[in-house]
Structure formats: structure tokens, C-alpha cells
Amino acid sequence: MTQLTGVVMQDQASQYPGAGQVTMPADVPAQFMLPLDDSCTLYSQLLPMAGSPTRLALYQNSIHSLSLPSALWDAFQRACNRGASNQQLADIIKSDPVLAATLLRSVNSAGFGLRTPINDVGRAISHLGHSLTRSVVARHSFSSNIASKGKEYHARTLWKHGMAVSALAEIVARYIPGCDGDEAATLGLFHDVGRISFDLFTQFMQSATLDPEKGHLAYECARFGCTHIDLGVLLATHWELPEKIVQGIIYHHHPGHSSADTVPEEVRAEVLAVYLADLLAIRLGFAGGNPGLMFPHASFAGMLSKATLGEIMNDKRVSAELTRVAAIEF
């Protein structure tokens, strides 16, 4: 089993009241079997939910009033997509002194245990790798637009969850034929962004308790009148993120409640990579406040043809990347 030496398990407490404990069900396909522990909750099912049109219209108006992220994010993503060098990426990052300082502070965090501080942005990118660098740039670019004002969710914990899923999705993508690792990593970073924005609407919260027989989407709908998927799509559309990322957000929970053919083919592999990465992140202590597990529909099993999920969990890159994510300070 993967051991995360030095990783602080950051968010074992559930923010979904009523969650119980977990025993691996017997009908999970062999490809998706995982060793589980008492930090996880197993949902009997994950019910898809439709948000209230009235509530969504209200939320949409509020989201449209948010400022747009800086052009730096687009410039960074375009540079990554064309295979830019670390120095070229560094030049983009250095155009924002606050971001450059944030990146240097991240790489010099105590968790990385550097003997000599890194003071060059290009070297910082080399040490962090593109996945973590992308995560730091994204958080800097987007978090100020949806700064948490309430207590329903902890924004820092959710960004850490997104960073973990992003890093793991890039690894999982290598085990799924035809999966684009960069796109899976970007989707992993944004898949739960709607959960962060719930705190913008705490005045509309209703009392609710998670029923493991229905899953957390039903809980969110009862509490807010919509799910984090709905809010994630509104945010991603407002931010003018690529359509494939918007589609990925729409379908990122489909493996838990629907067959593979319900997910458009052009995003199916990346959606599965993110879904499996999410399971691994929850199992390994980066749940983002939601410890619930719902294993994928059996129709997705054939897509994971190179290894089982348990074998991927034991990939040394998994523990290495999560150790690095845990070391990031912000």
C-alpha cells in the first residue's frame, strides 16, 4: 500500500453531516478495487440532481458580477500547450511580481526540505514540475474572484484537493489509452471549483444531512438548491474556460451514477481519469471535506486496461506527487 511519508492528512473531517464508514462492496469490478480505511464513506448510490431554475438564475447573476481572472492564466495555458520551456513560462509568471513571489515561497516551503533556497522562477518551475506550477498559477489567478466568506467549505482545503486530483489525474491518464494527461490535469484542478463558490451563497443555505443512500449531490441540492456541478459550470463559463473543461465539469460525477456511453466520447477518458484520481485523493487524505466514495459504473472498467486502481495507488509517483502537494504553503 502507498505510504505517504511526511504527508499531513489535511482534511479527514467531513463537511457532510451524517456520513458513515465504509466496507468495500463485493460487486466492484476488479479494475477499481482499492484497500480502504475508516476515513472513507461509501455511498450506496450517487443520485444525479437537477438544480432549481430560480436558484440557479439568482446564482448566475451573482457569479456574473465577479471579476474575470487576469490574462496571465490564458497566456500560461497557451504556452504550456505549445510546449514552452521553463524559462518561457518563468517569463510569463514574472510579469506578475506577486505570483512570482508566491511561486518562490511555495518551492521554498519547509516541506520540500531544500538545503539551498531557490530564488529563480525558472528553477522553481523545474523543481515543482508543470502540474504543481499550473496549480499555483491557477489558485493565484482565480481564488481572489471567489474568496471564501463563509464556513461551509474551507477554500484552502478545496484548492489542495484540486491540486491533488490534478497531479493524480496526470498519472492515471497514463494508464488509460487515448487519455490526454494535460487536459485531465487541468480538469482535475477545476472539477470541484463549484464547491468553493458555495460560500458566496451561505444566506440561502437550508439545514440538510447527508444520506449515504443518496450521496452528496442530493445533500447539496437540499442545502443550496443546486449542486457544485451547477455552480462549477456557471463559473467556468463566466471565466471563459475551454469548452472541454466545461464539459468535463458537467460530467465529472457521471462515472458514479451512469454508464460510460452517457459521457461524450471526446471527454470520456479524461473524465474517468479525474474520477479515479478523485477516489485516490479521498483515500489518501486529500478529500476536500467530502470523504464519500462511489465506485465507477462497471461499463467504465474496460477503459482501465493497463493496471488496476489499486496498482496505480502503489505507483511511486502517487506518493511523491502528494507529498509535494502537501508541502505547498499558501
Image (tube, rainbow, N blue to C red):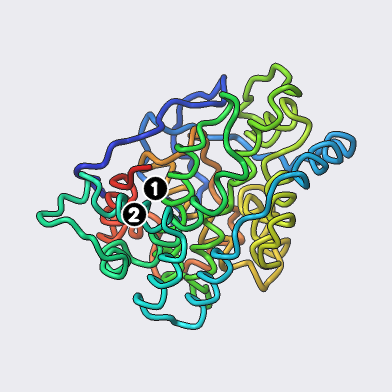
Q: Position of residue 144 (x, y in %)?
A: 56, 44
Q: Is residue 166 above or below residue 95?
A: above
Q: Position of residue 147 (x, y in %)?
A: 58, 37
Q: Which residue, as the protein is rendered here, is positioned at the far left?
A: 115
What amino acid is found at the position of numbered circle 2 in the picture?
Met
Which element is circle 1 on? loop
Q: Nearer the viewer, mark 2 or mark 1?
A: 2
Residue 240 as seen in the image, left or right of residue 287: right
The structure residue drawn at horizontal position 49% and vertical position 51%, both measured from the top left corner, is 140
Residue occupied by mark 2? 313
Dot 2 or dot 1: first in sequence order is: 1
Which element is circle 2 on? helix
Q: Position of residue 28 (x, y in %)?
A: 50, 49
Q: Nearer the viewer, residue 317 or 78?
A: 78
Q: Is residue 108 visible?
A: yes
The structure residue drawn at horizontal position 70% and vertical position 54%, both measured from the top left corner, is 250
Q: Nearer the viewer, residue 220 or 27?
A: 220
The structure residue drawn at horizontal position 43% and vertical position 63%, both measured from the top left corner, is 172
Q: Is residue 148 above or below residue 4?
A: above
Q: Is residue 31 visible?
A: no
Residue 121 as seen in the image, left or right of residue 94: left
Residue 135 as seen in the image, left or right of residue 217: left
Q: Which mark is residue 34?
A: 1
Examine the image and state in which quarter residue 74 appears: bottom right
The structure residue drawn at horizontal position 62% and vertical position 54%, both measured from the top left corner, is 252
Query: Is there CB contact under 8 Å for labels 2 and 1?
Result: yes
